[in-house]
Image (spheres, rainbow, N blue to C red):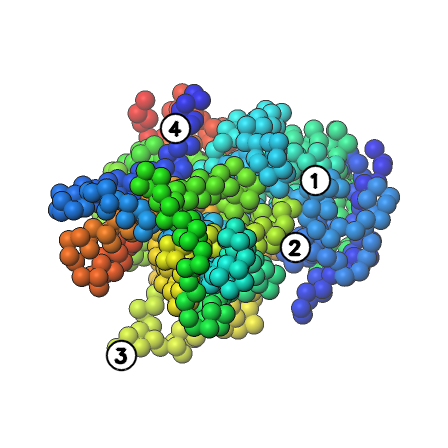
Amino acid sequence: MDKLLISMEGIEKSFPGVKALDQCRFELRAGEVHALVGENGAGKSTMMKVLSGIYAKDAGHIYYKGQEVDISTPRAAQDLGISIIHQELNLMPHLTLAQNIFIGREPRRGMPFLLDEATLNQQTAELFASMHLKLDPQTRVSNLTIAKQQMVEIAKALSFNSEVLIMDEPTAALTETEIEDLFQFIRDLRARGAGIIYISHRLEELQQISDRVTVMRDGHYIDTVTTNEVTTDQIISMMVGRTIYEATPELPDEPTTEVVLEVKNLNQGTALQDINFQLKKGEILGFAGLMGAGRTEVARAIFGADPVDSGAIYIRGQKAEVHSPQQAVWHGIGYLSEDRKRYGLALGLEVKENVAMAALDKFLGFLGWVNKSQIRSTAQYHIDELGIKTPSAEQKVKNLSGGNQQKVVIGKWLTADTDILIFDEPTRGIDVGAKSEIYKLLNELAKQGKSIIMISSELPEILRMSHRVIVMCEGRITGELPIEEATQEKIMTLATARKAIVNDSSPATPAVTA
Amino acid sequence: MEFKTQLKTLFNSDASQKILAFAGLIVMFVVFSLASPNFFQFSNIVGILLATAVNGVLALGVTFVIITGGIDLSVGTVMTLSAVMTGVFITNLGLPIPVGVLGGLLTGGFAGWVNGTVISKMRVPPFVTTLGMLYVAKGLALVISGLKPIYFSDNPGFTKIAMGDIAGIPYAVIIFFGAAIVASIILNKTILGRYTFALGSNEEATRLSGVNTDKWKTAVYALAGLYSGLAGVLIASRLNSAQPALGAGYELDAIAAVVIGGTSLSGGEGTILGTVIGAFIISVLTNGLRILSVPQEWQIVVTGGILIVAVYADMLRRRQS
């Protein structure tokens, strides 16, 4: 059990202008899950990229099973049996699952350059079977959901017979059940004597899965502790170097009774069936459910991004025609996508340009001339108001942290005078400190009378933030819970209430057409 | 179950685009045949096949490059340079024809290798690199030939390479089909083909999987160069001379054929059969419009229109699926 697999000592790494790692160390024993935590920019990912041969270290030593090794390419790491599952999925969407898993080591047929597709698919099928995954090796990756793609990444890593498996935020895109499956894999691997390095922002997971925790901060090694000897709060204070309020949920003020948005009988193929709900002024309405339950589809339908088969939307009692995002914005609806880098921001543009983007016509003067100083002052107003940490309104958005990028998106929708805001996974990929700031901001917005729909896969987030929780499963609303009655267990029960076992007693469940 | 999976794979593949393009080709054939009795004649069909051969061979190589998400603008003038070098080897140096042909092929392959090396090692964008190579090859062809065509009159066997025939079908056409089959095998059955798709789909992921992406990218451009070399030999043989001023503009026809054939300019998708159909669409169109006495200027306009319509149709299909 105590055999040392990996030992990293005195690791240094600099990028132009930043010292990313300063005298960092890390060790991993066989048969342990070792969590690596720290805020964004603490150097966790950099450290692991050094270990997996993606970055070359500037100084320091890496020992593998007691021998000093030189890991200068991803291939060298793989050959040693060190595999990494990256935070951003690294798959080739146009290739099949089998082709992805065996990329770089395809079985050959006789001649060294001829592919043996049959063996490739066969081996992949065996691999999936051993993992109890029901996937067709010949499906294209682009046809899979993010969660399934994640599983393919894990299958790929396991196929190397790796003794060291590095997982960078593996649960970020997974639902609770999928996380449980993943943890079971991890425990099996651990039992077989593999060492697993586990990077995560979800500190509540550490107690469940990790044996030891190493904390990093600002490119420095802080400490390594045994997980069951510390509390989550102690880990947090090591991470941030100060004590911040974290687990104390503040119950938001009660919303008013004024209905701002009402959705009636929304249908969209099999994706959405008979969706009915109301959103009140000043309310945060949580949308819970498993991945693929149809929560994002509801948001996109309301926002006019996808066409629907039938259904009506009423805004402040008036029937509203929303067939395009443009009309949605005109009605005061803003949508903050779960993938803000792709759909929410122009990363190469400045903060002020992003803030003005959804409402550029407000800044147009004579002959379509853009009033730049007005944009600047509006942007500065939101920077101050939302507490966006940026050197100036002219900073490019790509240089901001995840939490601050999210605030820029919020600023954008506030500029557009939207008062119904749909947040899709508002804190995905955002670190602990920034998360609580986003929460504060959401409460603040609700207090100001904005109405918020918050889609989230993190149950603690749903329970902490919402006035009311709507749970979806397979394109239908399976239940609605006032926050006083909502518990993780109740939500999960509703989120897995498949058609045959729908519980009709829940108050807002619409009549289900069998 | 097995069949259903296959059917699904087929539908998800680019097969439906090929069917669309192929249907377009058939429609053109029918329309031109009805419009003019001169169109559906053996001699005219052979003419179309022959006209397709050179552009088609170029397009085969370009297909690989475009699937990686790159572009090769140099294939036209590299073809010319290869033709000139073939002339130098055979006519000026008096080397045997097979040696000269090999020299021509390797000239193209070398130019492609240079493209690939500059792109992968020096990280110059493919557009710029191959635009540079377009000029370099064009200039070299003029310098080496001394601005004059090189004739193969002393080697009557050379012209047979393209213009010899089996049952009236010129060798050039047979070589084109052979080259297409080889290209299809490389793309679908070999490791080079697999990495061609992988590079175009997600280059960083491919690199992080331990694949030497620089090496394989260079190989793809070298392969495109080899196909340009083959086109150079074919055009020299067909014209019985190496014309140093020819070649500019061929790269655009080749790219057009690839795109009409359904290969995505953003990489990761494409087929050889599609490219072959695309090349035929262009030459059938040109030929048919000429038979209908449409002025040449207008033929060019129509070709451009077809290009846009073809890509639009493809995008409609993608949006639906």
Gap between marks 2 and 3, in whole Å?
47 Å
List x then y, in percent, for residue A59. Answer: 80, 60
Read off the chain for label 4: B
The residue to which callout 3 is attached is: A366
State the SS at label 1: strand
Q: Which of marks 2 and 1 is in front?
A: 1
The residue to which callout 4 is attached is: B7
Q: Do the residues labelled 3 and 4 touch (CB within 8 Å)?
A: no
The residue to which callout 1 is attached is: A165
Tell me the quarter of the image containing the N terminus of chain A: top right
Read off the chain for label 2: A
Residue furthest front as drawn: B154
Identify the residue at image location x=75%, y=29%.
Answer: A192
Q: Which of marks 2 and 4 is in front?
A: 4
Identify the residue at image location x=43%, y=72%.
Answer: B147
Marks 2 and 3: same chain? yes
Q: Do the residues labelled 2 and 1 touch (CB within 8 Å)?
A: no
List x then y, in percent, for residue A311. Answer: 26, 39
